[in-house]
Image (cartoon, rainbow, N blue to C red):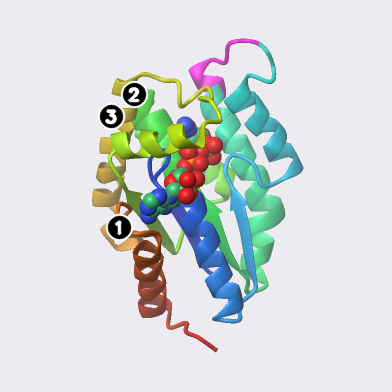
Amino acid sequence: MRGKLITFEGVEGAGKSTHAKLLADWLKNEAGLEVISAREPGGTHTGEIIRGILQYDAAKEPLSDNSEALLFCASRAQLCASVISPALERGAWVVLDRFTDSTLAYQGYGRGFDLATLRAINDFATGGLKPDLTVLIDVSLEEGFRRVAQRNTGKDRIESASMDFHRRLYFGYRQIEAFEPSRFFRVDGTMSMDDVSNCIVKEICARFGVGVQ
Ligand code: Z5A
């Protein structure tokens, strides 16, 4: 049986990496499933090189908005072809820290690119692959930035964009969710880590009939 693709989305500092890992651990250790985890951009050798260009100006020249959009999708295309599709086909579950909705939110609502064009580029990159479930972790921009600042690793290229850019993409996630409500599970990311994690596991069990082995 084909595996499931679960994606995590939200603003910076929402808790995506934390909860993607907690879910992947639960699926492996409690539900006994084969699980592949990856982050975007990245997750392959090519994708990690692209990540360096996108986040830390590794190419040492200003990146145009068009190049930015295409590079996110190039990283995704490589990840889909070499990791996600083969894993799903052999029945593994794939848990992703960001996927196609990030492009719609950041490059679409944030940068102002046409959403239909971005959807077409996303489909080209993924071969039309859609998540079985997208967990949208909801925290305010202020809370997300507070958490990121506590981490004290300095701001990357996209984190340094204007507050208006971040407000647009925060609102964008709501629009994307409204467009396909049944694919999304929105969870209040300001609850304790245990409560957020338990809500996500409960939703996965209810939707897909998996449970503790
Ligand atoms: N981007 C794009 O523009 N277009 C695209 O198509 C794609 C991406 C795929 C990737 O950055 C950047 O690329 C991102 C979008 C853009 N832009 N920015 N900026 P990244 O991968 O380096 O970072 P991120 O995706 O924004 O994630 P993040 O900043 O690492 O945040 P997070 O993963 O959501 O949060 P976290 O690391 O799990 O948690 C943050 C802190 O909060 C940490 O200390 C946790 O212990 C804490 N935490 C987590 N949950 C809780 C709860 N429930 N309570 C309290 N504290 C918590």
Please state which of residues 118 and 37 is positioned toward the viewer in this rendering: 37
Question: Dots 3 and 2: beta carbons under 8 Å?
Answer: yes
- Which residue is denoted by mark 2 in the rendering? 165
Q: Is mark 1 within 8 Å of ligand 1?
A: yes
Q: Residues within 10 Å of mark 1 (few under 14, many from 20)?
A: few
Can you say whether 36 is above or below 143 in the image? below
Q: Give percent across and percent down for residue 141.
A: 31, 35
**Residue 121, can we see it?**
no
Q: Give percent across and percent down for residue 200.
A: 38, 67
Magenta-span inclusion, residue 37: no
Q: Residue at x 52, y 68 (%)?
A: 4
Q: Quadrant of residue 35?
A: bottom right
Q: Give percent across and percent down for residue 109.
A: 33, 30
Q: Give percent across and percent down for residue 139.
A: 30, 45
**Residue 152, can we see it?**
yes
Q: Is residue 130 left or right of residue 30?
A: left
Q: Residues within 10 Å of mark 3 (few under 14, many from 20)?
A: some
Can you say whether 75 is above or below 61 in the image? below
Q: Which residues are magenta?
A: 61-67
Q: Quadrant of residue 108?
A: top left
Q: Residue at x 52, y 22 (%)?
A: 157
Gap between marks 3 and 2 measured at Cα: 6 Å
Gap between marks 3 and 1 measured at Cα: 22 Å
Gap between marks 2 and 1 measured at Cα: 26 Å
Check the picture and name the quadrant holding the C terminus. bottom right
Magenta-span inclusion, residue 64: yes
Q: Residue at x 38, y 33 (%)?
A: 145
Q: Secondary structure at mark 3?
A: helix
Q: Secondary structure at mark 1?
A: loop
- Which residue is denoted by mark 1 in the rendering? 191
